[in-house]
């Protein structure tokens, strides 16, 4: 009996270290994650969440907004805000907390446009606008929250070049508009508003950094491995970056560009960026495996799907957990609005919370103690 008990304790300890079993759920009011995914942001130990609710005919004109205490796991406040009426799935572009933790901003940047400002104190509406700095000529629209000067930051592709716009929070007036480098590929914009730089993938497959005005910073890197198919990238603090490569089925790598040097980690799955939040040196990826055959013969079937918490220093996998990939789209055209179910990464001291949407009307929260540099987990399935 003593031997069995000891084995049980050892197994539980290993499971918690490897799989982050210190977890709980938070309920979402009137949520249907097939039609609307939650936007999330956090600060001072409080999680803020916003999602649309729908009636039985799939119409929506209400935004459900909640604040949760991450220490007690309790809902602090909940409110319902009237928003433009839509039918069917609706993608949101972002939900952000201001640097002074006083203001929340929620955005939907495809017709009908909405930029909604709320008080973080009581979730009451402060102001809104439907006049965003986009026209029909803008593709790959992006709202990236606040820059280093607390200005609202927008980007898009226009006439083959990237375009960056700043707007005042107080009156929604445009303060600057910059036409940047040529958009080399029709893909998501990889941008760091606080450092005012953007990353572009060159025809060679390498990633290169530019200022918003289009000047090269000299930062450049690529994959040295066999898996050269690009699967996206995540801009980190400063000129740091994580890029994801792989084949189309079951192997890949993560390349870290940090302190002007690059390093690569091979994976037995195909990684793609899958996280939000602004935690220095950390990002999340969804890593999947599929059969190695054509999509029409079942090659698009997902065999395994895990979330990886990645540390750029290494790079290294510091935590992993089975997780479904979620998304919603306004239509079949990806440029009319797509929202990924990105988990929010929020750091408090030595602990990181990974807050993930699920297929159920609830959020899954995993609390992970950050390991020492010498004890980060290696890739293994």
Image: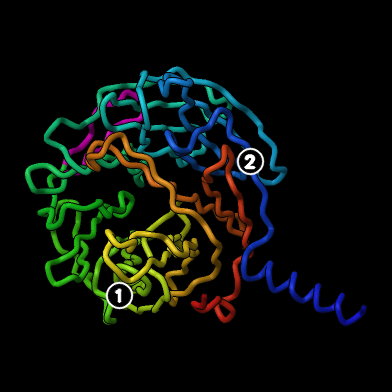
Give whichever of discs 1 and 2 has the lower sequence position.
2
Q: Quadrant of residue 236?
A: bottom left
- Along the horizontal axis of the image, is 182 left or right of 192? left
- Along the horizontal axis of the image, is 168 left or right of 69? left
How far apart are the two marked residues, 1 and 2, measured between alpha carbons?
40 Å
Residue 21 position (above or below residue 186): below
Q: Quadrant of residue 226?
A: bottom left
Viewer can see residue 174: yes
In the image, is residue 192 part of the stretch drawn in magenta?
no
| Residue at the spot 36% in from the left edge and 32% down from the top edge | 90
Viewer can see residue 150: no
| Residue at the spot 37% in from the left edge and 21% down from the top edge | 128
| Residue at the spot 19% in from the left edge and 52% down from the top edge | 212
Magenta stretch, overall SS: strand
Which residue lies under the disc numbered 2?
26
The image position of residue 352, as x and y in percent, is 58, 58
Q: Which residues are magenta?
A: 163-177
Which residue lies under the disc numbered 1?
260
- Along the horizontal axis of the image, is 254 left or right of 53? left
Badge number at residue 286: none
Quick one: label 2, few (<14), some, or many (20+) residues within 10 Å?
some
| Residue at the spot 48% in from the left edge and 64% down from the top edge | 308
Query: Tags 1 and 2 in contact by the CB under 8 Å rule?
Result: no
Which mark lies nearer to you, 1 or 2?
2
Q: Residue furthest right?
A: 1
* Element type where label 1 sits in the image: loop
The image position of residue 231, as x and y in percent, is 29, 63
* Element type where label 2 sits in the image: strand
Of residues 34 and 280, the one drawn nearer to the viewer in this rendering:
34
């Amino acid at each position: 009996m003593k031997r069995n008990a000891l084995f049980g304790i050892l197994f539980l300890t290993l499971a918690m270290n490897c799989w982050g079993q210190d977890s709980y759920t938070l309920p979402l009011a009137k949520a249907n994650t097939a039609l609307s995914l939650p936007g999330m942001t956090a600060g001072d130990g409080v999680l803020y969440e916003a999602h649309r609710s729908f009636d039985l005919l799939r119409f929506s004109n209400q935004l459900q907004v909640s604040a949760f205490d991450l220490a007690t796991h309790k809902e602090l406040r909940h409110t319902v805000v009237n928003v433009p009426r839509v039918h069917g799935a609706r993608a949101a572009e972002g939900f952000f907390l201001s640097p002074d933790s006083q203001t929340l901003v929620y955005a939907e940047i495809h017709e009908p446009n909405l930029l909604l400002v709320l008080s973080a104190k009581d979730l009451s509406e402060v102001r809104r606008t439907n006049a965003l700095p986009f026209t029909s000529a803008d593709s790959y629209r992006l709202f990236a929250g606040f820059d280093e000067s607390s200005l609202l930051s927008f980007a898009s592709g226009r006439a083959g070049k990237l375009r960056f716009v700043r707007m005042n929070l107080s009156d929604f007036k445009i303060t600057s508009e910059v036409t940047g480098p040529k958009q080399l590929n029709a893909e998501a914009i990889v941008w760091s508003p606080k450092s005012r730089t953007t990353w572009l993938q060159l025809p060679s497959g390498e990633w290169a950094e530019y200022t918003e005005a289009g000047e090269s910073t000299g930062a450049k890197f690529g994959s040295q491995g066999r898996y050269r198919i690009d699967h996206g990238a995540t801009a980190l603090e400063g000129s740091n970056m994580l890029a994801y490569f792989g084949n189309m089925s079951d192997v890949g790598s993560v390349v870290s560009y940090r302190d002007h040097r690059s390093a690569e980690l091979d994976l037995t799955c195909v990684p793609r960026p899958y996280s939000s939040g602004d935690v220095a040196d950390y990002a999340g990826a969804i890593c999947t495996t599929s059969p190695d055959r054509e999509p029409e013969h079942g090659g698009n079937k997902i065999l395994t799907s895990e979330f990886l918490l990645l540390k750029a220093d290494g790079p290294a996998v510091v935590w992993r957990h089975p997780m479904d990939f979620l998304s919603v789209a306004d239509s079949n055209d990806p440029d009319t609005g797509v929202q990924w179910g990105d988990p929010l990464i929020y750091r408090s001291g030595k602990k990181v919370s990974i807050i993930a949407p699920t297929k159920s009307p609830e959020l899954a929260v995993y609390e992970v103690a950050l390991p020492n540099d010498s004890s980060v987990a290696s890739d293994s399935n």
